[in-house]
Image (tube, rainbow, N blue to C red):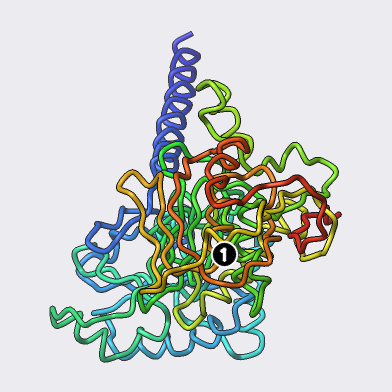
């Protein structure tokens, strides 16, 4: 009975120790995080080939400089680097440990078979070689890299002193570090983790959000940003930004500014009155609806469903016209729309003279437009009739206004032009000058938006 109890106790002890050691290994794996220069390398146990033992601990090399040389059989540069590493090891002897870390990329045994093959060909790798599975490597998690070769420099006290590419591994740099100097080495540090399932540079995925050469982005309405735009060329980038703008106005702005020449009426139309939507789903292309016509819930819903932000950033050598051209392509592609100029019959208002009396002729003087402090009234001094038409369409956005007065002289006039004026208000404002607005159908050049699918 005693023997039986004794055997059970030994078996229990073995199981307990297995759990403890397995648990420790598991904890080490789950707590793994990327190391940086200045961190102490943990005492990892690594399986190793070409060595007196089958495993090695990093602490076995305390008191010596260690270079971990990450490589794989798929990397020709890595393979070509191995003889150089062997030569450096022989040159520095006991002061240095060069430990190539070979990664089995596709299946287990790749590194082992490679070393056997090299030995048969009388090209043996004499250095000890640690082996890791690429997709299950604690070392790779501690020292993430974009590719191989990847060099980790650890000083005699176990501190990470450099993380570089293979070109930095020279006798001069090794000697400098052994002498206690800190040579400037080009780093190969992957400061940010990267997940291929996530967008590049988003939330630091693969780098900071400024680590790009060029980019463009479209977002939905952002309540934290006032609507508007920003153009910037600071010597480093050319940038266009538009905030909380409707799709038709994004298309119109990009189209107008990416063309060498545009009809003046289209160019002057800042409210999108000369835009005609021929897309099937015109509901998703609400151009403009003033928020004072809605309650706050309706306004929020309108903004969320109809307004967008767009930004494009290019190298400084690219012009604003280039940026607008890219913007147009982006917006057309994302929303599956196209925009172009067509002459079509559209409802409009004809600005006409109601008498032959000339109540508009200018008295001369310096041409000017003078606005009241509240912006609700304007005085035209020696200005062309087209300026009046533009101002009228600036406060009335239901239909295009077309100048049919035939008046070729410059004008003097002073009038109240309240924002969001209705037709009756405009007719009353124009009446003292014997001018009127009459509904009509006219063939006009329009920006026509169509489906692009």
Could you tell me if residue 136 is visible in this image?
no
The number of discs equals: 1
Pick the front one: 281 or 385 = 385
Pick the front one: 253 or 89 = 253
- Residue 289 vs 262, above or below: the answer is above
- Measuring from the top left, give residue 210's x and y in whole percent: 41, 62
- Measuring from the top left, give residue 164's x and y in whole percent: 37, 75
- Measuring from the top left, give residue 251's x and y in whole percent: 66, 58
Q: Quadrant of residue 235?
A: bottom left
Name the residue: 48% across, 53% down: 205
The C terminus lies in quadrant:
bottom right
- Residue 449 vs 161, above or below: the answer is above
- Measuring from the top left, give residue 318's x and y in whole percent: 51, 80
Pick the front one: 424 or 299 = 424
Name the residue: 64% across, 80% down: 260
Q: Quadrant of residue 117?
A: bottom right
* Residue furthest out toward the top: 1
Could you tell me if residue 26 is visible in this image?
yes
- Residue 367 vs 14, above or below: the answer is below
Left/right placement of residue 277 relative to residue 307 reads right
Q: Residues within 10 Å of mark 1 (few under 14, many from 20)?
A: some
Name the residue: 62% across, 73% down: 258
For disc 1, the marked residue is 385
Mark 1 lies on a secondary structure that is helix
- Residue 22 vs 78, above or below: the answer is above
Left/right placement of residue 157 relative to residue 315 reads left
Pick the front one: 99 or 166 = 166
Name the residue: 43% across, 61% down: 380
Left/right placement of residue 116 relative to residue 421 reads right
């Amino acid at each position: 009975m005693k023997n039986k109890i004794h055997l059970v106790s030994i078996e229990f002890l073995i199981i307990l120790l297995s759990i403890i050691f397995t648990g420790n290994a598991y904890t080490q794996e789950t707590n793994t995080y990327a190391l940086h220069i200045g961190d102490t390398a943990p005492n990892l146990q690594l399986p190793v080939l070409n060595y007196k033992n089958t495993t090695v601990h990093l602490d076995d090399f305390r008191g010596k400089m260690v270079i971990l040389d990450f490589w794989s059989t798929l990397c020709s540069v890595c393979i070509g680097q191995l003889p150089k590493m062997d030569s450096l090891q022989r040159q520095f002897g006991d002061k240095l440990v060069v430990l190539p870390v070979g990664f089995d990329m596709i299946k287990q045994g790749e590194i082992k078979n490679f070393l056997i093959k090299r030995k048969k060909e009388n090209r043996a790798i004499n250095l000890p070689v640690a082996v890791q599975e690429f997709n299950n490597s604690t070392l790779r998690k501690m020292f993430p890299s974009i590719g191989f070769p990847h060099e980790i420099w650890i000083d005699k006290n176990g501190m990470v002193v450099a993380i570089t590419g293979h070109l930095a591994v020279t006798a001069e740099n090794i000697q400098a570090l052994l002498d206690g100097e800190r040579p400037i080495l080009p780093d190969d540090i992957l400061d940010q983790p990267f997940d291929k399932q996530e967008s590049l540079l988003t939330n630091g995925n693969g780098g900071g959000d400024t680590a790009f050469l060029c980019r463009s982005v479209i977002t939905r309405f952002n309540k934290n940003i006032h609507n508007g735009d920003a153009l910037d060329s600071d010597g480093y980038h050319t940038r266009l930004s538009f905030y909380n703008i409707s799709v038709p106005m994004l298309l119109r702005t990009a189209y107008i500014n990416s063309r060498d020449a545009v009809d003046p009426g289209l160019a002057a139309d800042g409210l999108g009155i000369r835009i005609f939507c021929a897309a099937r789903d015109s509901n998703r292309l609400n151009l403009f609806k003033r928020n004072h016509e809605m309650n706050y819930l309706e306004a929020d819903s309108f903004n969320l469903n109809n307004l967008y932000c767009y930004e494009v950033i290019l190298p400084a050598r690219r012009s604003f016209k280039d940026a607008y051209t890219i913007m147009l392509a982006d917006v057309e592609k994302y929303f599956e729309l196209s925009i172009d100029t067509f002459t079509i019959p559209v409802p409009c208002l004809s600005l006409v003279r109601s008498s032959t009396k000339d109540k508009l002729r200018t008295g001369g003087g310096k041409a000017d437009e003078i606005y009241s402090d509240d912006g609700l009234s304007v005085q035209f001094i020696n200005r062309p009739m087209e300026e009046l038409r533009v101002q009228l369409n600036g406060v009335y956005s239901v239909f295009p206004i077309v100048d049919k007065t035939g008046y070729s002289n410059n004008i003097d006039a002073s009038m109240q032009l309240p924002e969001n004026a209705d037709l009756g208000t405009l007719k009353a404002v124009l009446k003292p000058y014997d001018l009127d607005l009459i509904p009509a159908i006219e063939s006009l050049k329009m920006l026509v938006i169509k489906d692009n699918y």
